[in-house]
Each structure stands twice: as structure tokens, then as C-alpha cells.
Amino acid sequence: MVKPHLRHYQVVGRESPSEKNPEPTVYKFEVFAPNFVVAKSRFWRMMKIKNKVKATHGDVLSCKVVKDAKLVARNYLVDIAYYSQRCGYTRMVKEFRDVSKTGAVSQAYHDLASR
């Protein structure tokens, strides 16, 4: 089994309050990253793509590590979107068996790196 090099983060953020929008919507993303700096960066990347909010116009409310304490093996379905110069953006769905989500995502990273 591969030792996970990633951590599972739950990042909560929103657009900065303004006169136009005094109570902005709060968004929560679950991100897999090696540390909290990369987790916040990935959070803002997704916010920019999905919700049209830049990091300069937003606030991170919390960034917490999610603990996986289960010792039972389960099957996890990992949905991956990656870019290749030959084919453009490609989506891939693959199933991995592990005791935690973090381990399954780490297996997916190692599997893609080996191709």
C-alpha cells in the first residue's frame, strides 16, 4: 500500500462583503493537498472557475484537516480531470481500494504519474 503524501482539507471561504453584496454566499470545498498553503491555492482556483471569485476579492474563513479514523477497507471512486497536449482536457473515473479517502487519492496521483 502506498503511504499518502496528501492531506484531506476542508476549506471554507466567501467573497468579501461589499455595498453591492453585504452578505455573500459561503462556499465549502474538500481539497487534497500536501499542506494548507496549497489547499488554499486550489480552493481559490476552483472558486475562480466555478463562482467567478478571485482570491483578491475573497476571504478564507477556515482551513481544517479532515481526519480519517476508519480501519476498514472500502472502494473509492475517484473522478479526475487532467490536461494533455495531445488530447486536451480528459476526464477519467477510476476505482481504488483503501482504508481512507486520502489513501485512495494518493493512489490515483501515483497511478497518473506512472503513465
Image: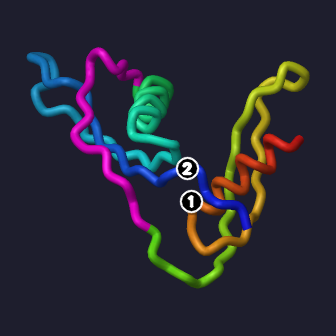
Q: Which secondary structure lies at badge 2?
A: loop
Front residue (pair 62, 19)? 62
Q: Quadrant of residue 40?
A: top left
Front residue (pair 93, 113)? 113
Look at 56% across and 59% down and name the residue there.
102
Is residue 100 inside the magenta stretch?
no
Look at 41% across and 22% down and name the residue there.
52
Look at 44% across and 50% down and name the residue there.
30
Which of the colour schemes (rainbow, by chain, secondary structure, one colour) is used?
Answer: rainbow
Which of the two labelled residues, at mark 2 and mark 1, occupies the earlier sequence position? Answer: 2
| Amino acid at circle 1 | Thr
In this view, 2 is above or below 89: below
| Amino acid at circle 2 | Leu
Cα–Cα gap, marks 2 and 1: 7 Å
* Quarter of the picture holding the C terminus: top right
Q: Which mark is residue 102?
A: 1
Left or right of 71? Residue 81 is right
Per the rendered image, the range of residues in magenta is: 52-67
Q: Which mark is residue 6?
A: 2
